[in-house]
Image (cartoon, rainbow, N blue to C red):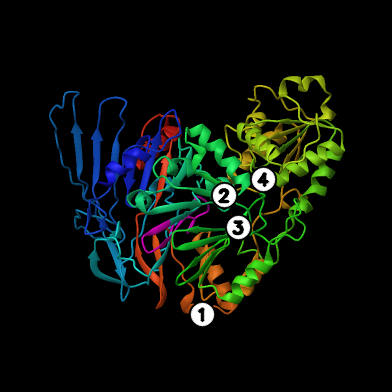
Amino acid sequence: MLNKLMNKILGGTVNTTDNQVTAQVKAEPTVAKTATLTAVAEGEQKQTRRRTNTRRPAGEGRTRQQTAGEGATRQRRSTNTRTSANGGRTNTTRRTNTRRNAEQGEGQERKTRQTRAPRGENTRNTRTNNGRNGQNGQNRNNNRPNNRSTGWNNQEEQVELVGRTPNGANKGKFQIIPLGGLGEIGKNMTIFQYEDEIIVLDSGLAFPSEDMLGVDIVIPDMSYIIENKDRVKAVVITHGHEDHIGSLAYLMKEISCPVYATNLVCGLIEGKFKEHKVSPKCLRTIAAGDEVQIGQVTVGFIQTNHSIPDSCAVYFNTPIGTVLHTGDFKIDQTPVDGRLMDMHKFAELGNKGVLALLSDSTNVEKPGTTGSESSVGPAIKQAVGEAKGRVVLATFASNVSRIQQAIDAAVMFNRKVVVMGRSMVNVTEIAQERGYLNIPPNTIIDVDVMHNYTDDQIMILTTGSQGEPMAGLSRMATSNHRTVELAPNDTVIISATPIPGNEGAVGRTIDNLLRLGCNVVYGKDRGIHVSGHASQEELKTMLNLVRPEYFIPVHGEYRMLRRHGELGVAMGVDPKKVLIGDNGQIFEFDKDGGRKGGRVQAGAIFVDGLGVGDVGNIVIRDRQQLAQEG
């Protein structure tokens, strides 16, 4: 059943590994068409532990399901199905490999992968994203904490996942189910479900690590949403960054419901929908301060500060209490757009009583407060004023406030601005059309007329601040850009810090720029970048304002969630009411309080827009071997 449902959302090939789906998308960026999942029985979904290879006629792609056994041994069951155009015969082979664990010396064969439960604890489902592991076994963005004690009991049980529950089974219950963003950075997606009514908050993506060869983007496993598509009442978006809207087009190809977002975010989503041939009729524009009735839940939007305008926190007023999600935020007293965070509304909710708070954990390890976005402007102006030749400024395309300050610096020093990179061009146009960028007439010029100006009259805004190999800055650094050839007199400003996992790529880009003789301005000490996320003192302020009964840290790797939980306890939250989980965990609330419940299918879908083959763990491994050995 679920296999058929996934066929609609996925536009290439899907591989399912444990709780992870990998997808290969062909020429168009659509999600893969097939998913090998388990049957649904009595409303629960059992995860199979076998590896299946299905060969199809050319052009249809392949589906693989693989699970690596834990402990000492592994049994592989491989089914190869060869089907001719007229429905030819099927050949099935089975092979069993027994692999001995050198450390533990066990030698038993297993037919299924099973999860070991700590003594005295319930069995938990642990997922391994082998595609991100590379050869060193490290998982940068998809760590799955296990919270296990050092002791193990000998009983091994097969994990059962919650699928579609019968109508009425969740009567009086409010459930929070993260599908992305816990134990990782990026691909944020959370389900808020009251009884049988589902509201999806955000639908983001993550960028692949360097060892994920051929993978373009990573999106959340949407299996639970697809299986319950008739129960989805709305999608709500907190802000317009890729890690919150990057997979929305894939989701909306499968479900039909309104999408609520602020003005700028709706503009950015429309651009993505156009690329993916998705109708924008589902979009509903709201503003901070609005409330929308969605089924039995009232959804409200609160003005926050972040590195993109029109960012909001979202609260859910339900019959059993109010749940608040901060979204990405920081407290900025001097924002570039002049719109202060609505602290009064947070305090008002706190005074009325908040059942549960979900709060951004990205910068919880940083003491103090995060600098104001407006503090970056003077540093950019200083660097532009000192530049002798052209200025190339690289930043995130969605950082509209940073783009505004770069343009202000260009205007101050009589420079024309050339915008390069598809995403940078799209965001600049949308933000200007909707009133979020103030650009004087004749400031932006086309690249074709750039040669009519001297070098000291030009600023180039481009993508590539993360060292992406195909982005504008990386091409310039390797002298492969079709229109720009950097010279020793040029100044390059990298107005961003590397996302975890991108440090190597950014470092190589800087090295290449320095080899060309460019003056490169980068690093925190130069003042040309500040974070958009709250540091410890701002997180404490949020906890003090809201005073939640339950606290669920979100948006961060596991150590960040733990640290944020400790911060919550220090601010007065009952330690027993700090709930820390990972993707797929059900947090359940009813008249008797809150607790961790079961689990749903969660993981990652790998999207390969090049159409070079299915992007599963085996394919990534093969690509790594080819890259190293030829």
Label 4 or label 3, whichever lies nearer to me, is: 3
Q: Residues within 10 Å of mark 4 (few under 14, many from 20)?
A: many
Looking at the image, tell me whether mark 4 or mark 1 is earlier in sequence order.
4
**Region of the chain picked out in magenta, as a range:** 178-198
Tag 2–tag 4 contact (CB < 8 Å):
no
Mark 1 falls on what kind of element? loop
Reading the image, the residue beneath label 4 is 399
What type is the residue that disc 4 sits on? Asn
Note whether residue 530 is visible: yes
Q: Callout 2: 10 Å neighbours few (<14), some, many (20+)?
A: many
Q: Which residue is mark 3?
A: 290
- The number of callouts visible is 4
Residue 186 is inside the magenta segment: yes
Disc 4 vs disc 1: Cβ atoms closer than 8 Å? Answer: no
- Image location (x, y in percent) of residue 291: 57, 59
Magenta stretch contains residue 483: no
Using residue 421 as the reference point, say whether residue 493 is left or right of it: right
For disc 2, the marked residue is 261
Give residue 574's mark.
1
